[in-house]
């Protein structure tokens, strides 16, 4: 492969990286600084510099100012991570076969399917989530159908549960899984799959040795695009979950609004960011390690 | 050819078609409800009060709503185009470029807009813009959108590039010997599905963004999501459904027209 | 060669930015008024009449919460001439210098204001604000589904077993807790930890009976019977009743929480003269009546009632009993806000 001319990295990377550095990293430095300041009386921050916001994440202060371990925020984080992980797994389970199906069509159908998957997302998510409430609520369409057909006499409460949140999250992020996988499978050579099928004699083997190696990159991209935004989502938890339990997204949002504790909101975000970034760096390292030999 | 016993048809894996149809039903169910309730006579979005076209009239006559819709489209198109133009070279650099110290860090930085909870980005960007005195009206919103659109455009393109065979490009390079021609005639067409997927995702996230827009927007820059979220306090009216339906019809119309024109153009060439 | 391509990208980008700036730049001609308010909280008829009477072009931008407005004004003027702010936020905005002094008593039309709403606690000199709409926070009951007595906040906070899973609450710490404090007979903005412990115990005990905490869609939930008892504003309860006769807004013996939204002029407003014209305009009874007819909330302009729609004139939601105790929540000090945050987080752990 000595013929492969390696492109020069920096000039190509610079514009995008520059935009991120100026308009994302710089604001994040401000947010980072905020996490070490004291909450202003009515929002905002003021001096002195303190690490109290980070201490508060794990400890509660007793009346005599001594620290007691408090797992409240860990519980909230754990719940959000579990829900985001479940969302991601479900999205892969649904998204991979759909992407495979799409990739197997002819060009015109493929293009139409890509459009068909994205069109619902051109309308506002808030309104679409509202429509889920209409469909799922006690007097909603599903219950009306169930009662009408005599399956049940009393309405079944679907809403305001973890399952409803999960449905909302999968609904919100599914195309972010389907499209990247589809983009990697699109160039799947039918002859390869057929050959694999002949060789190993089985759909599963054909999938395992031909489709999956290609899809892997798409699944990795989709996982990032689904897991991370799902972690910070607050619309589905509030509207479909009934706001009964806090998620990281709502917790942080609350700190910047009615609880008026910007430093704690910033600190919680920094912890969340550190968690995700470390995971991403590890993934990038592992990938680099696989390619090198 | 006898190896093709019974002719394995890779396209016809059982169940996949059914699943895809079910997924489409899942994705479109709320949309059907949304459009149906746009014809609702009641002044509440979630209570059916008979058939009426009044909300379409109201939505069309509402100049604030029209402005918000127009702002949304302007920002989304700008952000999608710019973010995708930034993402393509960045994806090539990250997938094909030499490894360098800090590459994992650079990769993670590109994902930063995804990682940070929106409210934090929103407030930090607001503070940052006012610190550097950036007041470009709606361009402020567009800049903020470009930033968070980059990872959404970048990841599908990178995924597409990752396993793309290099030999085609190498062969082309030997033939044309000019990187620009190789890029335009070989790399770009091969990359196109990834670019389309990335651009679509960027467009979606921009069109739907609420918190960052809310904070960064100056007078006159209200977008559709900001307008709709502002309804939550007093009750969402079917005007929201009507506006969403109109916008949907408009965008589907434009895309279908473009699709038909492109197909015709494609046929003419062949 | 790469740099050439880059330059082209940069050029295109600057051209785009320029084009966008030009589009946005056209908004700053003479005769503009930029209003910032919740969506559907400004009567379109009111704006149309104002535009017709004065020739000023009104641009309406919308937001979702007082906190958003606070964050935006703190970072420097966002270009609004008029903003609508809840009473508890008025002292915050004025003490932080985020709103202009308007000296309302000197404005034409000020004498039209109901003496009850002149010089309120949140703006003792009417130096910064004039009233927009006001209302109360209590709860409503679907009387078809619940036949028990409804004269106390206990139905909401300590619901009988038959109401389990049928109670709805606002999803805002301050709105839930200020009503809880009225029920417990405490003054608002508690900084006393023992008292806040009582609030916490009350809410934790209530939680299993609560179906959901959500501040939107209440009108629908109460009208359709999805919830039987729901914390609600009076104007919203009226809209529920218009859909379902069985919905009744309760004036409990313990009292209710009151709120007032006020019109202010943000510091650095580009069209302060037009803003004044608007303030004078909305203090005329026939104009303010347009606003109340649209939102179904009361206003503070004497004589506007005669222009009210018939459905509003005899609405029980808009005519509270004379002896009703109405507690207006002030801007809570830091300590109280933090205690509320703790209780809220525990409640939803």
Image: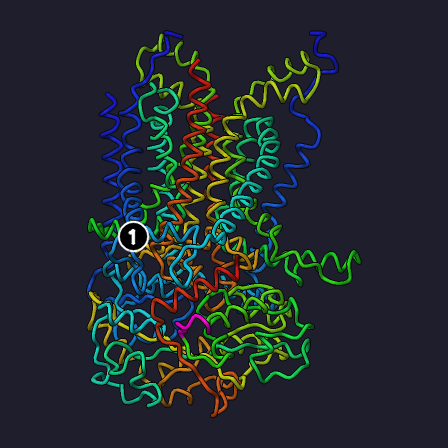
Q: x%, y% of residue A221? A: 47, 32
Q: Quadrant of residue A146?
A: bottom right
Residue A249 in the image: above or below residue C332: above
- Chain letter behind tag 1: A
| Residue C262 included in the magenta stretch of the image | no
**Whether residue A1 is visible:** yes
Viewer-nearest residue: C203 or C92: C203
**Whether residue B126 is visible:** no
Q: x%, y% of residue B262? A: 46, 32
Viewer-nearest residue: B60 or B204: B204
Question: Who's the residue at 54% across and 26% down the image?
Answer: A215
Viewer-nearest residue: A27 or A29: A29
Residue C295 in the image: above or below residue A121: below
Name the quarter where the N terminus of chain A is drawn: top left
In the image: residue C69, left or right of residue B41: left
Q: Quadrant of residue C78?
A: bottom left
Viewer-nearest residue: C312 or C251: C251
Name the residue beneath numbered marker 1. A50
User: Which range is magenta?
Assistant: C189-195
Find the residue positioned furthest to the right: A150
| Residue C194 included in the magenta stretch of the image | yes
Question: Who's the residue at 51% across and 79% down the image?
Answer: C183
């Amino acid at each position: 492969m000595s013929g492969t001319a390696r492109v020069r990295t920096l000039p190509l990377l610079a514009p995008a990286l520059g935009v991120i550095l100026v308009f994302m990293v710089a604001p994040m430095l401000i947010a980072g600084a905020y996490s070490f300041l004291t909450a202003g009386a009515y929002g905002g921050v003021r001096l002195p510099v303190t690490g109290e916001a980070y201490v508060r994440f794990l400890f509660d202060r007793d009346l005599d100012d001594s620290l007691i371990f408090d797992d409240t925020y860990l519980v909230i984080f754990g719940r959000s991570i579990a829900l985001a992980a479940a969302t991601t797994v479900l999205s892969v389970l649904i998204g991979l076969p759909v992407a495979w199906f799409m990739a197997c069509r002819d060009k015109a159908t493929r293009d139409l399917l890509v459009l068909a998957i994205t069109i619902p997302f051109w309308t506002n998510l808030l309104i679409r989530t509202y429509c889920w409430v209409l469909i799922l609520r006690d007097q909603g369409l599903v219950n009306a159908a169930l009662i009408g057909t005599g399956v049940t006499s009393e309405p079944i409460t679907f809403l305001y549960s973890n399952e409803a949140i999960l449905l909302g999250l999968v609904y919100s992020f599914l195309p972010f899984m389907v499209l990247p996988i589809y983009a990697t499978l699109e160039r799947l050579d039918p002859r390869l799959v057929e050959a694999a099928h002949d060789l190993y004699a089985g759909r599963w083997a054909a999938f395992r040795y031909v489709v999956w190696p290609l899809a892997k990159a798409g699944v990795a991209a989709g996982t990032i695009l689904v897991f991370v935004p799902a972690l910070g989502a607050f619309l589905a938890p509030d509207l479909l979950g009934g706001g009964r339990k806090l998620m990281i997204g709502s917790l942080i949002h609350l700190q910047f609004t009615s609880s008026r504790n910007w430093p704690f909101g910033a600190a919680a975000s920094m912890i969340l960011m550190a968690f995700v970034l470390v995971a991403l760096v590890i993934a990038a390292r592992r990938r680099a390690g696989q390619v090198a030999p | 050819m006898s190896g093709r016993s019974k002719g394995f048809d890779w396209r016809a894996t059982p169940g996949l078609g059914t699943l895809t149809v079910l997924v489409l039903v899942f994705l479109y169910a709320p949309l059907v409800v949304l459009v149906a309730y746009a014809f609702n006579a009641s002044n509440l979005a979630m209570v059916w009060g008979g058939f009426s076209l009044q909300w379409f009239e109201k939505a069309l006559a509402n100049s604030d709503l029209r402005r918000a819709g127009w702002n949304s489209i302007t920002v989304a198109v700008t952000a999608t185009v710019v973010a995708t133009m930034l993402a393509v070279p960045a994806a090539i650099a990250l997938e094909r470029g030499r490894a360098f110290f800090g590459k994992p860090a650079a990769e993670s930085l590109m994902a930063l807009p995804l990682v940070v909870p929106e409210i934090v980005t929103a407030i930090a960007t607001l503070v940052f813009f006012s610190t550097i005195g950036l007041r470009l009206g709606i361009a402020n919103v567009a800049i903020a959108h470009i930033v968070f659109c980059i990872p959404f455009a970048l990841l599908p393109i990178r995924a597409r590039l990752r396993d793309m065979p290099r030999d085609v490009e190498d062969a082309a390079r030997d033939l044309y010997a000019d990187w620009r021609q190789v890029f335009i005639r070989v790399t770009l067409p091969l990359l196109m599905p990834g670019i389309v997927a990335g651009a679509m995702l960027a467009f979606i996230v921009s069109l739907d963004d609420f918190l960052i827009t809310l904070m960064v927007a100056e007078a006159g820059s209200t977008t559709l999501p900001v307008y709709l979220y502002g309804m939550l306090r007093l009750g969402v009216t079917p005007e929201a459904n009507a506006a969403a339906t109109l916008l949907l019809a408009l965008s589907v119309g434009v895309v279908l027209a473009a699709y038909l024109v492109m197909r015709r153009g494609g046929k003419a060439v062949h | 060669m790469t740099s050439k391509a880059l330059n082209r990208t940069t050029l295109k980008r600057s051209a785009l930015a320029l084009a966008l700036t030009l589009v946005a730049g056209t908004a700053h001609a003479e005769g503009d008024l930029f209003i910032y308010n919740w969506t559907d909280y400004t009567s379109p008829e009111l704006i149309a009449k104002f535009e017709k009477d004065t020739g000023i072009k009104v641009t309406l931008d919308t937001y979702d919460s007082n906190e958003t407005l606070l964050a935006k004004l703190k970072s420097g003027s966002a270009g609004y001439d008029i903003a609508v702010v809840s009473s508890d936020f008025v002292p915050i905005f004025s003490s932080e210098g985020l709103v202009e002094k308007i000296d309302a008593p000197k404005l034409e039309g000020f004498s039209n204001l109901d003496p009850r709403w002149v010089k309120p606690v949140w703006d003792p000199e009417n130096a910064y604000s004039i009233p927009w709409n006001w209302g109360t926070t209590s709860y409503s009951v679907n009387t078809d589904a619940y036949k028990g007595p409804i004269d106390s906040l206990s139905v909401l906070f300590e619901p009988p077993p038959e109401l389990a899973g049928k109670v709805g609450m606002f999803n805002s710490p301050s709105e839930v807790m200020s009503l809880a404090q009225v029920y417990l007979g405490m003054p608002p903005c508690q900084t006393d930890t023992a008292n806040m412990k009582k609030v916490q115990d009350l809410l934790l005990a209530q939680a299993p009976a609560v179906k959901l905490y959500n501040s939107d869609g209440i009108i629908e939930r109460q009208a359709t019977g999805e919830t039987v008892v729901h914390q609600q504003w009076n104007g919203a309860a009226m809209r529920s009743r218009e859909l379902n006769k069985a919905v009744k807004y309760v004036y409990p013996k313990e009292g209710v929480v009151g709120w007032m939204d006020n019109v202010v002029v943000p510091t650095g407003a580009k069209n302060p003269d037009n803003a004044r014209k608007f303030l004078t305009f909305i203090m005329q009874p026939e104009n303010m009546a347009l606003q109340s007819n649209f939102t179904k909330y009361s206003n503070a302009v004497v004589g506007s009632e005669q222009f009210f729609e018939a459905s509003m004139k005899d609405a029980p939601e808009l005519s509270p009993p004379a002896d009703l105790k109405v507690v207006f929540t002030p801007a809570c000090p830091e300590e109280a806000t933090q205690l509320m945050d703790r209780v809220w987080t525990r409640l939803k752990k």
